[in-house]
Amino acid sequence: MTDQAELMPTLFIPHGGGPCFFMDWHMGPPDTWQKMEQWLRGVVATLPARPSAVLVISGHWEEPQVTVNSAPHPELYFDYYGFPPHTYELTYPAPGDPELARQVQSLLSQSGFPCGETLERGLDHGVFVPFKLMLPEAELPVVQLSLIAGLDPDAHLRVGQALAPLRSQGVLIVGSGMSFHNMGALQQGSGLADSERFDTWLTQACELPPAERRKALTEWAQAPSALEAHPREEHLLPLMVAAGAAMDEPGQHIYRDQVMNATVSAFQFG
């Protein structure tokens, strides 16, 4: 990493449903995920420069304290169930970055977040599934960071704020989740109204002036259809980290789609 790298924005991206981009989809129209796939393939080209490394916070990893994967060659963790056999043979041989992992630990510890590390847990599908599209050559180092059990939004905003210095080293900080994640509603195709109400609020919140954005995101559960959109908020909390890492800079809506009769969005900060 270099101190002269371009300042990176931060992102909150949808990572789809399991290995949805790499299989024939039978739980709805075959092209259900096509628009999202095309968008993910083009994300890196919109950045001001090519990242030096990627730090990903996925909605699929929670620990009692924030924890970083410091493996030099992380394996994959196939944390989805009931999909075709070939989807458990997907590969994504991106290197890790132990030096970046140590820096993450240091920044978080300095901000009052003791940070554990693991060499064992592989990159989950909230990481390798979208990044097989975003960075298909798997040449950039990828480091994954956990959520903190308890899912306190303010804590995750502050985690992001602690990580902000990495952006000036060219590190791309990505929150990977879904802006609507009510699995029952998705499976039944009944989430459109709730997803649209929450998506309208979330877009407005992310595009508020930074101080107002922080307050709104901290109080996200009071938003219209918030608890219908997120009966459990682990897929929303990665957005808090991305927003926190660009706390004094604007946010903008960058992508919207309808999948499984629900509206989902992506956001950029900084």
Image: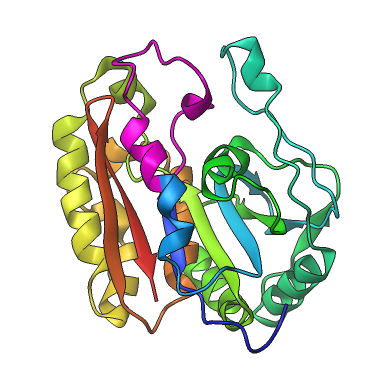
Q: Residue at x 54, y 82 (%)?
A: 6
* Up/down of 65 relative to 250, above or below: above
Return the residue found at the far bottom. Answer: 4
Nearer the observer, 55 or 238? 55
Is residue 153 at all visible to an observer of this figure? Answer: no
Q: Position of residue 259 (x, y in %)?
A: 28, 30
Q: Residue at x 25, y 80 (%)?
A: 209
Queried whether the magenta region covers residue 264, the answer comes back as: no
Q: Residue at x 58, y 83 (%)?
A: 168
Nearer the observer, 234 or 192? 192
Q: Residue at x 61, y 83 (%)?
A: 5
Q: Left or right of 158: which side holds 53?
A: right
Q: Position of residue 59 (x, y in %)?
A: 53, 44
* Up/down of 183 relative to 239, above or below: above
Q: Quadrant of the C terminus?
A: bottom left
Q: Left or right of 178: which side holds 164?
A: right
**Span shown in magenta:** 13-39
Nearer the observer, 90 or 15? 90
* Up/down of 165 relative to 50, above or below: below
